[in-house]
Image: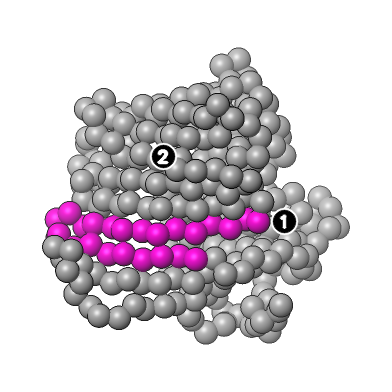
Amino acid sequence: MMKNLIHTLLILVTFHVTAFAQTPKSYTVTHIINKTIDKGEYVDDKRIDKKDKISTDNLIYISSPKNDSIAFYDFNDSPVSEKKVPNICALAKNQNSLLLTYKNGSYSTKLKITFNNNEKTVLIGDKDVFYLNDSYYKYVQKSVGDNLNIPDLIDFLEDFLAGYGLEDLKYISSYEKYKHKDFKITKAYMESFRTQASDYLDKWNVKFSYSNAGVPSYVLKESGEGDREIEKTLISSNKGIFKYTKHTNSESRLITDTDIRMDVNNHRYDEKVTSLQAGLGKETRYEIKQISYKKFHFKELMLTSGNISNIISSK
């Protein structure tokens, strides 16, 4: 526990020094309030408990001036405390590649990111290859590769954040690929080992489709054996509001169906989720609704309980 705390504090110091060594500009705070409605558990479509449970989640993201470092605080119906250590995400250049690190509580994620200008590909780790069209590759290479912009990287990896341990950061996506109709991922190839059979390697082909208007309309991540881990389908799009259904199947153990509503102009992300634990035959249902989104400048990285209370209570 102490080792993890010391490691996180060292990252915080690096974050602080890096952010202010380059520019005197202040940090940017993004404060999001989500309401989660727990619809309970079901067996054979019969509800086990009787009442919905409602909780409020205060998400506070603090971004460095260049968006290459982000501190994340999460207060889910918990008391505001200055002792809470934030999660830290940082993107830095590492020889001929980039290195993304994300320290989240007791675990950390490290991702190497490599650009290939000749092939117009982005390599994530050692095996996952994404093929982009010319306009989107130029944008990502400059924004992420040169400028180390994390929100644009989150937007690029959007459908695969959970697999990379970056799900916490989906709310700070830039949504650029939804705003530019000529930004396209043409295909991808991915590999992963089974969580319960570490010697079994899954090889995935990922297909991407777009509407005539250039809107992302379909994503399918499918193995050579025909297993479909992710299938996402566009239902409607109108004036920056996109509705999707997303089906995920994690090794036939956890099967999830999600209705997603995104308002990319107002940075709003809502979802309705039905999740089935296949081995137990137990289904859970919940909704997450965004009720507030605020963005403003701030001079500090480490928040005191007073700072946090002011942020949460501000109108």
Residue 45 can be seen, yes or no: yes
User: What number is the disc on residue 233?
Assistant: 2
Q: Earlier in the sequence, mark 2 or mark 1?
A: 1
Question: In the image, what residue type sits under mark 1?
Answer: Ser
Quarter of the figure with the N terminus: bottom left
Q: Residue furthest top?
A: 118
Q: Where are the magenta residues, as a range?
A: 266-289
Q: Name the residue rendered at 37%, 33% in the picture.
A: 220
Marks 2 and 1: which is nearer the front?
2
Residue drawn 71% across the image and 79% down it: 314
Residue shown at 52%/84% (left/top)?
A: 79
Identify the residue under disc 1: 64
Depth order, front residue of 122/15: 122
Q: Is residue 235 magenta?
A: no
Q: Position of residue 113 (x, y in %)?
A: 55, 35
Q: Quadrant of residue 284?
A: bottom left
